[in-house]
Amino acid sequence: MKTKLCIIIGIVLCLVSCKQSRQKNLLVDLLQDWQGKEIIIPDSMYTILGGRNLGDVFAYEYTILNYVDSAGCLGCNLRFREWNILLKEFQDWKCQVMPLFVFYPGNAMKIREIRDLAKSNAIDYPIVIDTLNVVNKLNLFPEDARFHTFLLDKDNKVLAVGNPVLNPMIKDLYLKIMRDENSLIEEDGKKVITSISLVETVLSMGDFAWQKKQQDTFKLKNTGEKPLVIQDVITSCGCLTVDYPQEPVQPGKEAVLRMTYKADNPGHFNKVVTVYCNAENSPIKLRVSGNAMEMN
């Protein structure tokens, strides 16, 4: 759980400018507060659509809870068409997941509107009409609507926060969590663990003109007997991005992590790269430094 939270925080920080330190701290505090928190959903609530009840939904390995109120454009907030596409994609990956919408309508007109939207989009998952806003009052969801969507486990505990329809990085995170928890477990229930070696853990990009991108690589060699699976790589700043292998790295082979740094401003930098994988010493901390110079 702690690893997943670190990944979520890393993604959020990458979406916030390096200069917005106060906002970063607030977001980190918010996500830490929700780590492993159980979402309370009364089973007596009324589902208006689909042939499923809440018991059917929670029989799945994962639930994506999406709380929506009546503020603003309802169709824009619900995005049923995009959710249908996303659910099909998750199902194609054999993920045992079902969305659950909880809607606080505000008035009867909004209920009619959501019925029409659900019918026109052939919604097959439950939409719960919460006329008294009970779910929000029980759980005290964040005020920021970006954090009204939660990936839950079978115990309704939060694994990840964020809307996968609106943010492809969040979608990838949800997919990684749902797939990796199974792919990194052997038949006897034990986690697949391997070992790695690194030639270096510190990388210097030297001096360069700050307007130009700089690129370099780290190499991780799989020295164990099991495939190496890199689940995610998080950087301490959005100005440093990393490309890494999406497929398992076989024993004896190397995983190449390609670093790209694009400075926002001139100056010396010293960034941390955190690699989450199935190695015995994961997470692995790497460091990238350099001097982005203003040149005439």
Image (tube, rainbow, N blue to C red):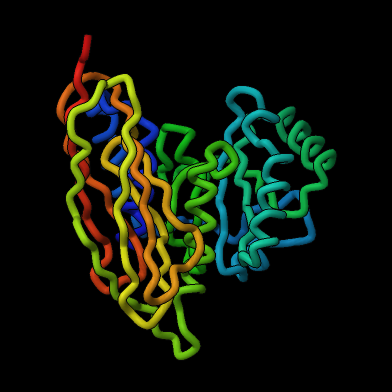
Q: In the figure, 264 relative to 234: above or below?
A: above
Q: Where is residue 141 in the image (x, y as percent from the top left)?
A: 43, 42
Using the image as rendered, state which of residue 42 and residue 266 is in the foreground. 266
Which quadrant of the figure contains the N terminus?
A: bottom left
Residue under the image location 49 percent in, 43 percent down: 169
Q: In the figure, 187 relative to 83: above or below?
A: below
Using the image as rendered, state which of residue 244 and residue 106 is in the foreground. 244
Residue under the image location 60 percent in, 22 percent down: 72
**How many marks do you count on the picture?**
0
Q: Position of residue 206 (x, y in %)?
A: 18, 34
Q: Which residue lies furthest to the front in this view?
A: 296
Which quadrant of the figure contains the C terminus?
A: top left
Q: Where is residue 62 in the image (x, y as percent from the top left)?
A: 55, 63
Q: In which quarter of the image is residue 114?
A: top right
Residue under the image location 32 percent in, 49 percent down: 217
Q: Quadrant of residue 185?
A: bottom left
Q: Where is residue 283 in the image (x, y as percent from the top left)?
A: 27, 61
Residue under the image location 34 percent in, 43 percent down: 259
